[in-house]
Amino acid sequence: MNRLTLTALAIVILAGIVLRTSHIRDEHRLTPNERAYLYDAGRLYDEGIGGTQALFTEYRHDPGLWAVAQPARIGYIFLLDAAMHVMRTKNLEAGMALSYLASVLTLLLVAWLGYRFFNAEVSLIAAALCATAFTEIWLVRGTPEDGVFGLFGLVELWLTFELMRTPRRYWLYAPFHLVGVWAILVKQSGVFIYGFCALWLLGWLLFREKSRKMAVVLAASFAGGLALVALAYIVLAGDAITAWRVYLLSFISNDEGWSYNKECCFGPWTQIPRALFLLSPLTFFLSIVGIGVVSFRKSATSLLTPLQRSCAGVSVLLAIGFVSMFAFFPGMEVLRFITPGQGAACLVAALGLWMLLSFARTRLEPSEFAALAVLVALGFAISMVRDYGVFTRIVTQARIPELGAAQIRMALGQ
Amino acid sequence: MRSVILFAAVFADAALLLSAPEKISLAGLGAFLALLLSLVILFSRAIEWPGAGGSPLPAVAALALCGLNPAAIASVSRAVDSNLCTALAGIAAGIAICRWIPSRGWHRWAALLPAIPCLLLHKVGIAFGPLAIVSALCFDRRANLWPTLAISAAAGVIYRGAAFHPVDSIVAVPATIASFVAPFAPSAASGWNVVDGVTSTLVVLAGAMAPIAGFGSPGISFGLFWFLAMTWLAPGEPVAAFPGIAIALVSAVLPLLSALRAARKPNLPEVVAP
């Protein structure tokens, strides 16, 4: 990495951290889920890990609690409990610290993945897109599980990349499965993070490495991972029936939960892409460009190695998977749900721009390419300022309590 | 292809600047982008960089200077006058056609095609004929552009009742220059008086006449006349005047860049065959 790129990367990361830091204490109305996380983690803080059985049993028998999804998200409650122990407090500060840490680590990890698996330019562009990403800054306020959940998605993506690079580093499969399992324990949709990554890796082992044996072992260990999730629920709930019942109930809303969803999270499927475009047109268009160029075999083969193409492919799968899943799911059109796809989308978008620049480099003279680089940097600066302006308009002026696509559109007068 | 890539980057930046969720009508956005598109052609024709082998960089720089200028963007997104933008696009396209192989006769008629409909939209259309003549004087004296003058005269008749305040126009000269140079300074466009206006108008006029006397490139002259004409006809509308300043500025800088380039070239000793 040359000195200029390194300096630019440092500035971008610093700007991202400053932005996150400056919004930790924004006024924020806690969602029903956040209040429940704090309550449950506080119980574990007082009673220790043995308190989980009481949480599961209470939840099972009290319909008033069914508006929220706990304790099916026990993985997040454990992390919040750990944060409370570290900070020696049971109040919101611990949750805010956890969300802040997750958001900063996501930014750093996006930059690292871009550098390790692609190149310094991709790293810089991806970090710049992630630094002002709306959801990443929004999630440092309060204690939503989605910041941590998004980080789990990105870590799983990282492990997938590493395993595709060196599939015979067998010890790496252990963290791959553990992170996948924990992602499910953090949020039910974690099964898609684990599933998408395992599925892609399976294809890589089968078709690229031509190792049927390793593929079979991976599939079996994936099934074992799901069994481990079930086992964890049973052990923590105390018995299988309570665990199963609580897990099913976590998908059912009571009247309170339903009215909350109706207020924030309904609308046509086009709302999600439209909201994403309104929040950051640059990231939106570059992601489309990235998906296009990665899918276009000729351009991708000439500029990317097979490993890089595969890394881009699994990123595309994760980004598109999460966006489309929640766009089409009624009552789930909330942008914080798609956080595991956020970092992946930044990488894909960065790859798209880098490939466009590589295309231009061969066609322009050095002075002209320098002018293009200045224009691109200017565009990024404009975009970052613009996106942050949109953030302050939505968060500090409209003060929407949830990241519902419909609420964002209304806040922006669209 | 080189030009397309670079101009596309400027357009993308302009679109990003205008994509803030303040209300901007689709008509206004379309008119502004059409204006930029016609300025691309005009700049490519009006700015020459001797010895650079047809490099698109000067035109790109001029387009970026006027199209991405925060003052221009602010005026477009504040009160989108799509009529003004469309009229300017027509004028720029008309003059660009005049500049395109000007020795052929049909151009003087073809130039009227984009210009006439646009002239009906805003009083800046009056400047079309004089500016076409100035472009001919600056770049190609053989061109015969009397029909453009007739069109301008017709536009003058149409807009004879339109409000015109000479004092406002005079004061707008330094204010527009200041908002071009210091677009982020909120006070740049205010606090000027008639004395400042007259002085700066005279300085600009002298700068515009200098190339005719043999100092500087003709682009400076054309750009400054454009600036003066538009500032007089549409004071307080940076979108109208900025293309002129951009052409003049880039044309003024290019000879210096050429000299720098020539000085940088290594002076290799002549190789003599044994």
Image (cartoon, rainbow, N blue to C red):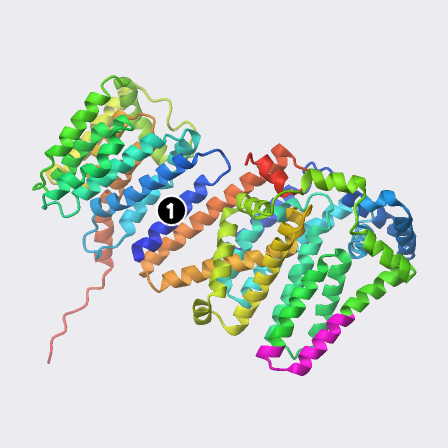
Three-letter amino acid code at the position of disc 1:
Phe
Can residue B263 be spotted in the picture?
yes
Q: Magenta: predominant secondary structure element?
A: helix
| Image quadrant containing the C terminus of chain A | top right
**Which residue is at a point 68% across and 53% down the rendered structure image?**
A102
Q: Which of A262 and A377 is in front in this view?
A: A262
Which residue was labeled with disc 1?
Answer: B11
Position in image of residue A82 (x %, y %): 81, 55
**In the image: residue A352, left or right of residue B107:** right
- Using the image, name the chain to which the residue with label 1 belongs: B
**In the image: residue B136, left or right of residue B177:** left
Q: Nearer the viewer, residue A300 or A97?
A: A300
Position in image of residue A330 (x %, y %): 68, 47
Residue A296 sits inside the magenta stretch: no
Task: Quadrant for residue B129, please give it.
Answer: top left
Tag 1 secondary structure: helix
Count of labels shown? 1
Bounds of the magenta span?
A206-224
